[in-house]
């Protein structure tokens, strides 16, 4: 029986803030669906050239108080990046907290505005440990 990956869905409280976060990661909106009757918006975002692997941001117009504040109902999203240090620096420069710094030159974790854990993995071999990352402590949890 063939199987085809479609997308991963996460619920968001503030669509614009969440989209801005995923845009910082390099994702772009690939399609959008608004349901007047259902009172929700779906925004699909994916890395350029990888439109077949989107994350679906689901925004309920009337709010979503059922979202847990730590998002532990969900595992994490993971993206491979060309330079984990440069990516983390870019995110930090734009106000994103690095929850688990890439001390090993290989892996970092950040959180979206909706507390979705996002893992960043260095493409290829790990980079050599470098400051400020090597001595940076964890912040919060991922």
Image (cartoon, grey):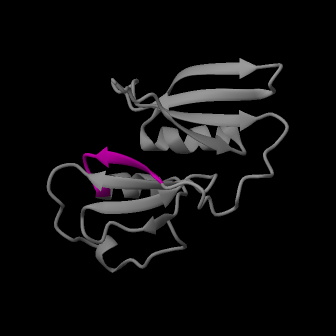
Relative to 37, say whether 130 is above or below. below
Q: Residue at the spot x=60%, y=57% of the render?
A: 73
Q: Residue at the spot x=80%, y=24% of the render?
A: 38
Q: Is residue 52 magenta?
A: no
Q: Is residue 80 magenta?
A: yes
Residues in magenta? Answer: 76-84
Check the image and name the residue furthest to the front.
Answer: 1
Q: Quadrant of the N terminus?
A: top left
Image quarter of residue 71: bottom right
Image location (x, y in percent) of residue 113: 62, 52
Q: Residue at the spot x=52%, y=52% of the render?
A: 94
Is 25 on the left-hand or right-hand side of 68?
left
Image location (x, y in percent) of residue 57: 60, 36
Q: Nearer the viewer, residue 5 or 48?
A: 5
Image quarter of residue 51: top left
Relative to 92, say whether 43 is above or below. above
């Amino acid at each position: 029986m063939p199987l085809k990956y479609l997308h991963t869905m996460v619920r968001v409280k503030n669509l614009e803030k969440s989209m801005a976060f995923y845009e910082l990661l390099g994702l772009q909106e690939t399609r959008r669906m608004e349901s007047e009757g259902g009172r929700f918006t779906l925004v699909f975002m994916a890395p350029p050239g990888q439109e077949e692997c989107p994350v679906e941001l689901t925004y309920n117009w009337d709010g979503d108080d059922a979202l847990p504040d730590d998002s532990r109902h969900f595992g994490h999203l993971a993206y491979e990046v060309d330079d984990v240090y440069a990516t983390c620096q870019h995110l930090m420069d734009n106000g994103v907290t690095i929850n688990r710094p890439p001390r090993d030159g290989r892996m970092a974790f950040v959180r979206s505005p909706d507390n979705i854990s996002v893992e960043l993995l260095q493409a290829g071999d790990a980079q050599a440990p470098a400051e400020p990352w090597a001595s940076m402590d964890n912040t919060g949890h991922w």
